[in-house]
C-alpha cells in the first residue's frame, strides 16, 4: 500500500531515453501517479525510447519501426511525466542539484539518474576528418539509430553494394541481416577472421559460414574513405586495394558516454563508477545505469570488483540494473522497504561472482542470424595446453561441416564456452553454464545433439529454462502467455517482454506458439 501523498514529491531527473531508461520509467510511473515523484526524462533524440539492438532489422525491412518502440512519449506526458525529446544537456551543476540544458534552461533534481548509454566509435580515417564530431559524409552511417536504419534501407532499395567496416558482433549481424534480404555485402575486418578475439579458432569457422551466406569477407586495415562528389564511393586498404560501394556502415564498437559525468567531477574509468547500489561513487544523489555505468565499488576486499569491470553494451544486464534501481526507489520513496542504499546489485546469490555493470564473467553473447549460429560465454581465452590446477580445456573442430566447440572448466564446472555452427549443443552448454553445472568426464558426449542422425536427441527444454535472457523470461512464462491467448510474437512480447531485447529468441517464441496450436488441433 502506497502511503499518503507527501506535500513535496521527490524530483527525479533521468538523462537519456534509451531502452534502459524506458525500463526505469516503467517502475517510476506508479510513483508519479501517487504523487510521490515528479519525473523528468531528457532524451537527445527526437524519438522516444526504442530498441537499438533491432535497428538492423528495421534497416533491412524485417521489422517495422513501430515494433521496436519501447515508450510512448504522449502517453507518458498524459500520466504526468515531463518528457523532453530533442533536448541536450550542457552540464550538471552538482552543488545546486540541477541539470543545465543547451538552451539555457535548468531542471532541478533531488535524485539524478544517468542513462546516457554509449556512442559508436568513429574511426580516424582519411575522408572523415573534414566533418564535425556528429556528422558523416552522405552514404556513411553507424546503424545505431533510426535515421541510420533509413539510410541503409535506401541503399538496399537502390541495390548498392554495402561495405560494413568492423568484424565484431554488431558488424557481423548487420552484414548478415542485409545479406539475408538480398543485399550485396562486403565485410572488412582486422585480424585473421571476424570475432577472433571472442571465438578464437572458432572465428575461422564463422568466416566460412559468412561466405556461404553470400558475404564477401575481406581482412585488412582501412586507410581511408574514398569520396566522389562528396559522397561515399569506397574504402581504401593498406597495399592499395579499394573496396567500392554505395554505402558504408561503421561498426567499430561503442564507448560509454561519460562526458557529462566527467564534466561534473564524477569518478570515471571506462564508465561512470558506481557502487553495488548503482549510486555514483562518492555521491548521495546521483546514480548511473546501462552502458554508461561501471560497477566497481573501489573496495579492495570486494571479490565482485576484481578484474575487468568495463560495461559491455548488452541490453539484458542494463534492464536488470533498471529493475533493481526502480524497485529500490519505489521501496524507499513509498516507505515499503529499507531503502535503496541497502540494496545490492552485482554479486551473485549463488556464490558466483558478478563483475562490472553487466557481470562480464556471466555474460552470454549470441550471434542472432538465420542459419549462422555462434554463442560465447564466460572466460574463453584459456589455452588447451595450459597447465593450471583445476583448469581443463576441451576443444573440438570440424571445419568441413562448419562446426567448432570449446569448453573451459575449473574443478569440473563450466566457466566458459565457444560454440559455432552447433545450435543445439550451444543451447545445452549455455544452460549448463548458467546453472554452474559440473560437466561429465567425457566432454564429447555434449556434442551429440548436433551429431549425425540416429544419435539420441537432446532433451526438450523445460518450463523453468530461460527462453529470453535479455528480459529473464522463462519458457514456461511464454507458454502460459500463449495458452492465455497470445497468438503472435508481438502478443507474447507485450505480455511477457520476451523478444524485446536482442531478438535472438523470437524463433523460439514462434516455435512455442506453433507447438501450442498444433497440440490444440490434434486434441
Image (spheres, rainbow, N blue to C red):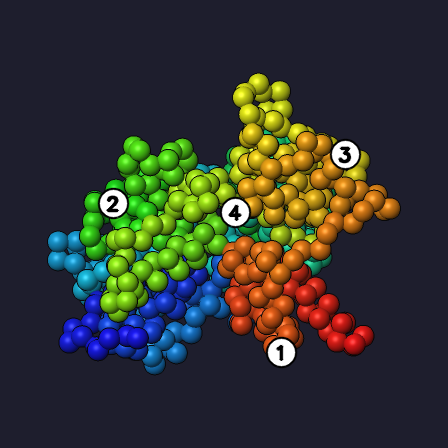
Tally of numbered tags: 4
Q: Residues within 10 Å of mark 4 (few under 14, many from 20)?
A: many
Label ID, residue 250: 4
Q: Which residue is mark 3?
A: 398
**Element on which disc 4 rests:** strand
Question: Closest to the observer: 197 or 273?
Answer: 273
Between the C-alphas of marks 1 and 4, the distance is: 42 Å
Q: Which residue is mark 2?
A: 281
The reply to whether dot 3 and dot 2 touch (C-beta < 8 Å) is: no
Indicate which label's residue lies in the foreground, 3 or 4.
3
Indicate which label's residue lies in the foreground, 3 or 1.
1
Indicate which label's residue lies in the foreground, 1 or 4.
1
**Element on which disc 1 rests:** loop
Q: Earlier in the sequence, mark 1 or mark 2?
A: 2
Q: Residues within 10 Å of mark 3 (few under 14, many from 20)?
A: few
Q: Earlier in the sequence, mark 3 or mark 2?
A: 2
Q: Earlier in the sequence, mark 3 or mark 1?
A: 3
Amino acid at each position: 500500500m502506497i502511503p499518503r501523498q507527501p506535500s513535496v514529491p521527490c524530483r527525479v531527473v533521468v538523462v537519456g531515453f534509451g531502452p534502459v531508461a524506458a525500463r526505469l520509467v516503467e517502475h517510476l510511473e506508479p510513483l508519479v501517479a501517487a504523487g510521490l515523484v515528479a519525473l523528468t526524462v531528457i532524451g537527445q533524440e527526437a524519438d522516444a525510447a526504442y530498441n537499438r539492438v533491432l535497428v538492423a532489422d528495421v534497416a533491412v525491412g524485417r521489422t517495422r519501426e513501430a515494433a521496436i518502440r519501447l515508450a510512448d512519449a504522449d502517453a507518458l506526458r498524459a500520466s504526468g511525466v515531463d518528457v523532453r525529446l530533442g533536448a541536450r544537456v550542457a552540464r550538471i551543476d552538482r552543488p545546486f542539484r540541477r541539470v543545465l540544458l543547451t538552451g539555457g534552461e535548468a531542471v532541478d533534481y533531488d535524485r539524478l539518474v544517468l542513462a546516457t548509454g554509449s556512442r559508436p566509435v568513429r574511426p580516424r580515417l582519411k575522408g572523415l576528418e573534414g566533418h564535425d564530431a556528429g556528422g558523416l559524409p552522405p552514404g556513411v552511417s553507424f546503424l545505431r539509430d533510426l535515421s541510420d536504419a533509413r539510410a541503409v534501407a535506401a541503399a538496399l532499395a537502390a541495390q548498392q553494394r554495402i561495405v560494413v567496416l568492423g568484424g565484431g558482433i554488431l558488424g557481423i549481424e548487420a552484414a548478415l541481416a542485409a545479406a539475408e534480404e538480398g543485399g550485396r555485402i562486403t565485410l572488412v575486418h582486422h585480424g585473421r577472421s571476424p570475432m577472433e578475439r571472442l571465438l578464437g579458432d572458432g572465428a575461422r569457422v564463422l568466416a566460412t559460414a559468412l561466405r556461404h551466406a553470400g558475404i564477401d569477407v575481406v581482412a585488412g586495415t582501412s586507410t581511408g574513405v574514398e569520396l566522389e562528389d562528396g559522397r561515399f564511393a569506397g574504402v581504401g586498404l593498406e597495399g592499395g586495394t579499394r573496396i567500392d560501394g554505395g554505402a558504408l556502415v561503421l561498426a567499430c564498437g561503442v564507448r560509454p558516454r561519460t562526458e557529462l559525468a566527467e564534466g561534473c567531477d564524477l569518478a570515471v574509468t571506462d564508465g561512470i563508477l558506481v557502487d553495488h547500489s548503482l549510486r555514483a561513487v562518492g555521491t548521495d544523489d546521483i546514480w548511473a545505469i546501462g552502458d554508461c555505468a561501471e560497477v566497481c565499488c573501489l573496495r579492495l576486499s570486494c571479490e565482485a570488483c576484481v578484474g575487468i569491470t568495463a560495461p559491455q553494451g548488452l541490453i539484458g544486464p542494463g534492464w536488470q540494473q533498471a529493475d533493481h534501481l526502480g524497485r529500490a526507489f519505489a521501496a524507499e520513496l513509498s516507505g515499503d522497504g529499507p531503502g535503496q542504499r541497502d540494496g545490492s546489485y552485482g554479486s551473485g546469490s549463488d556464490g558466483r561472482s558478478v563483475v562490472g555493470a553487466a557481470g562480464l564473467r556471466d555474460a552470454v553473447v549470441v550471434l542472432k542470424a538465420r542459419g549462422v549460429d555462434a554463442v560465447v560465454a564466460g572466460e574463453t581465452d584459456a589455452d588447451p595446453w595450459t597447465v593450471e590446477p583445476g583448469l581443463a580445456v576441451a576443444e573440438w573442430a570440424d571445419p568441413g561441416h562448419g562446426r567448432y566447440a570449446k569448453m573451459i572448466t575449473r574443478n569440473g564446472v563450466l566457466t566458459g564456452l565457444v560454440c559455432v555452427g552447433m545450435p543445439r549443443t550451444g543451447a545445452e552448454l549455455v544452460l549448463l553454464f548458467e546453472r554452474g553445472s559440473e560437466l561429465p568426464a567425457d566432454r564429447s558426449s555434449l556434442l551429440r545433439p548436433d551429431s549425425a542422425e540416429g544419435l539420441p536427441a537432446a532433451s526438450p527444454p523445460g518450463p523453468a529454462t530461460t527462453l529470453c535472457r535479455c528480459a529473464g523470461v522463462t519458457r514456461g512464462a511464454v507458454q502460459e502467455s500463449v495458452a492465455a491467448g497470445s497468438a503472435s510474437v508481438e502478443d507474447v512480447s507485450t505480455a511477457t517482454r520476451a523478444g524485446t531485447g536482442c531478438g535472438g529468441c523470437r524463433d523460439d517464441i514462434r516455435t512455442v506458439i506453433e507447438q501450442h496450436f498444433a497440440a490444440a488441433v490434434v486434441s
